Amino acid sequence: MSATSGAVKSNSTINVNQWFNGAELNGFHWMVFVLSLGIIMFDGYDLFIYAGSIPLVMKEFHISPTMAGAIGSYMLAGAAIGALVLGSLADIVGRKNALMWFAALFSVAMFLTGLTHTATTFAICRFVTGLGVGGSLPNVTALASEYVPGRKRATIIATIYAGINVGGVVAALLSIWLFPHYGWRSVYFLGGLPLLALPIYGKFLPESPVRLVRRNRLEKLRVYLRKARPQEIVPDDSVLEVEKGSGKAPIAAIFMEGRALSTVLFWIIWFMNVYVIFGFTLWLPKLIMNHGFSLATGLTFLLALSAAAIVGSCVAGVIADRVGTKPTLVGYYLLSFCSVGLVGFTGNYTYLMILVCLAGAGFNGAQNTMNSFMPPYYPPSMRSTATGVCYGLSRLGAILGPLLIGALMTAHFSYRTTLFALAGPSLISTIGIIAIQEKYSFSRKLAAEQKALAQNA
């Protein structure tokens, strides 16, 4: 029985964070899930669509592979800036408003990309697209984490972020279908579709509870409280209490109250895992070709990896809710380390396919589970800032991974050495997760308070 279960008396105080945390999954939460998943799927689509269009863009704009690679880096640089700078703005303007602005930004930029006729304007549009994607990703995590029930949080957030891989699959399939008939611009025009969905988001996406309290929109917050737990009564004169943070500057606050070590560890873990994700995924077709297979076979492996990432993320969320998020992450990072490293030790198609699928499930499942583990570590008022910094720094890992692996291949390092250079960071992530100090986690403190209140009720 949760701390605030049962009928709430008039003039009583409701802890908003505990109320949402102790709710049972219902239609309100599924609405938040679907809306969040929609944004993440388009983020994934925007991130991965460039890979399929590179050959056609190079041919039309007469650009070199070096320039094509640089354009890809501009997108990731924009995502880093969007997460580091724009992501934290949501703590000021509200997460709902921020998400809608960022969705509009990456949608317009994607559509305009299809209208470009020079490499320079194409690169600028990709950079702006990255700004929107980078700004939206941490805010989806922060907003969904505030509303979904604590007992289902890992499963829901991990499944939401599997939408990135779904977007990647959609991008690949649409490229195969549309390129021969409508050219590369068609897939970028489709990237503008989220603009049509903004009225739906404006009407149904809830705003952050902290934002509603600060704006004195308490009646709206009571509506969400009733939707989250419809079987319980929320009196109109009840006092709503919400955690507002330390009152310090957001960046400084994420290091306070014992969080400094774990904050740095989160940065390292995030950086290392994204390094593995982008390094392995980008070079996978080439790595498979080094085994003597064709490019078509390499692309088949890429599609299999994306599918395994979706399944692995969903399974990771379920395991995390049952046995704990931290043990799940340790297992998934070790799975990533072993499977990526072993790719260099076999040339058998079946064994390679198994290892690639395990790798995709491992590092993608771990990343999506981290999206449910890290944000609740911080009080609600600073979650966008904390996640924004992590996402921004992780983009640097996304840039470094492909560049470093390419340099090793160019320098003719052995195949196995190159694979271990990709696998090694997963071991660092494993050690980092073990060292995280959960005793300073806001969600753990909240759960302890709920348990104590329930025992005294």
Image (tube, rainbow, N blue to C red):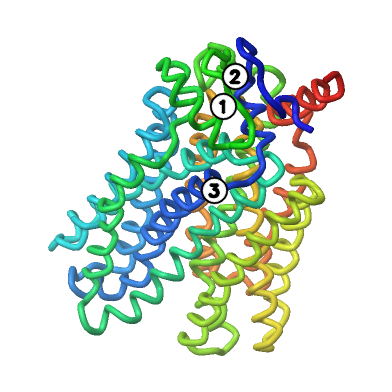
**Front disc: 1 or 3:** 3
Nearest to the observer: residue 67 or residue 60:
60
Q: Are marks 1 and 3 in contact (CB under 8 Å)?
A: no
Of tags 2 and 3, the one toward the viewer is: 3
Across and down, in percent, residue 294 comes to 49, 89
Residue at x 15%, y 60% (from the top left corner): 116
Name the residue carrying label 2.
243
Q: Quadrant of the C terminus?
A: top right
**Residue at 48% from the left image edge and 42% from the top image edge:** 140
Discs 2, 1 touching: Cβ within 8 Å: yes
Q: Residues within 10 Å of mark 3 (few under 14, many from 20)?
A: few
From the image, tell me which residue sits under label 3. 27
Residue designated by label 1: 380
Q: Mark 3 is on which residue type?
A: Gly
In this rendering, position of residue 159 left or right of residue 187:
right
Q: Residue 332's x, y, as percent?
A: 73, 58
Place of residue 214 in the rendered image (x, y in percent of width and height, measured from the top left): 44, 16
